[in-house]
Image: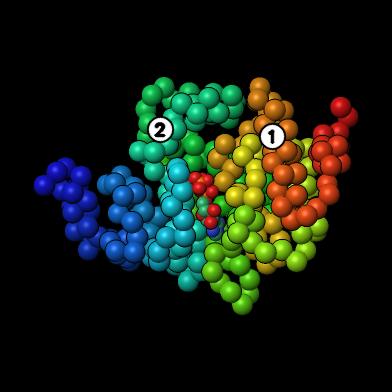
Amino acid sequence: MNKHYIDADKQMRKLEETKRLKSVEDKQVSSEVFDDKTLKVLYKLANKGYIRSLNGVISTGKEANVFLGIDDDDNPVAVKIYRVMTLDFKKIKEYIAGDPRFKSHGNNTRQIITAWTQKEFKNLSRLYKLGLRVPEPYIAMENVLVMEYLEYSDDDNSAAPPLSKAKLDNASEVFEEIIDFMDVAYNKAHLVHGDLSRYNILLSHGHPYIIDVSQSTLDSHPSSRSLLERDIKNILYDSKKFKLNLTYEYVRNRIIKND
Ligand SMILES: Nc1ncnc2c1ncn2[C@@H]1O[C@H](COP(=O)(O)OP(=O)(O)OP(=O)(O)O)[C@@H](O)[C@H]1O
């Protein structure tokens, strides 16, 4: 038996003395993300009441898996677990290096992934405090982020779909809200999303919610202006898919002022 399994086994037994995090060992919850260090983090979060159980996978992305969890008050939560193995550490180090909020971590992958998760938590907090539509962040611990679960609607509690898969009756309003978001994020939170597109915007209760902000940069970052222009172009491209006639100048002038 290799070390990974021995450690995981030891932790499973330790669970008898500690609070039980139900269904981590369930077949429906992919085992690949639960290396022994991640398991430890999940148990700590269980002991703190942030997750009582994990109830299946919402998404398996390139860099992270997102699970539907239930907290101690029976509320659903979204649990994003960054996968140590598949992260693009070169890209991450460039983003962290340009951000004065994070000090350099050399080549320690565990520290880099923790900084990356903290970065997503801090960016979400900054946006959420301004009243912007992002999932409310609850806690970040090592490679795990727990946040508000976004549901589709009151009648349909399934996970909010990305705009890439959503049908919109109110496309014009939704895109105006996205542009408002970009305006407040840039001019008040001083953040540029950096990977904004229909894949990172979820439709919840008829409104667009922006997710996946780990790579979002402060406006002082050397690449922030080019990332913002790329975000604008992506949103314009997406708006055409919904048959809207927004122009580049219109969107740009709403966001970049005094230029
Ligand atoms: N708070 C949330 N509530 C509901 N669903 C969510 C939430 N956060 C993320 N998701 C779901 O998980 C998916 C992946 O989330 P996210 O983009 O943050 O992770 P990612 O690993 O960076 O994804 P990818 O690599 O595919 O871009 C989203 O498209 C969405 O379907």
Residue nearest the observer in this picture, 207 or 12: 207
Q: Is residue 211 left or right of residue 256?
A: left
Seen at 37% across and 31% down, the residue is 109
Quarter of the figure with the C terminus = top right
The residue positioned 59% from the left and 27% from the top of the image is 99
One can see residue 40 in this view? no
Question: Which colour assignment does the render follow?
Answer: rainbow
Residue 45 occupies quadrant:
bottom left
Res 24 → quadrant: bottom left
Residue hosting label 2 = 111
Does 50 sit left or right of 138 as displayed? left
From this view, report whether residue 158 is shown above or below residue 44.
Answer: below
SS for callout 1: helix
Indicate the secondary structure of the residue bearing disc 2: helix
Distance (Cα) linking label 2 and label 1: 29 Å
Q: Residue at x 44, y 30 (%)?
A: 89
**Which mark lies nearer to you, 2 or 1?**
1
* Count of numbered marks: 2
Quadrant in the picture for residue 152: bottom right
| Residue 88's disc number | none
Is disc 2's CB within 8 Å of ligand 1?
A: no
Tell me the amino acid under the disc marked 2: Gln
Name the spot of residue 163 as percent of width and height, x first.
Answer: 64, 56
Q: Residue at x 61, y 77 (%)?
A: 155
The residue pinned by badge 1 equals 230
Residue 245 percent location from the top left of the image: 83, 49
Against 147, is 52 above or below? below
Q: Earlier in the sequence, mark 2 or mark 1?
A: 2
Residue 211, horizontal then vertical, whole percent: 60, 49
- Where does residue 22 sit, x and y in percent of width and height? 33, 66
Q: Are marks 2 and 1 in contact (CB under 8 Å)?
A: no
Disc 1: CA contacts within 10 A as few (<14), some (14-19) or many (>=20): some
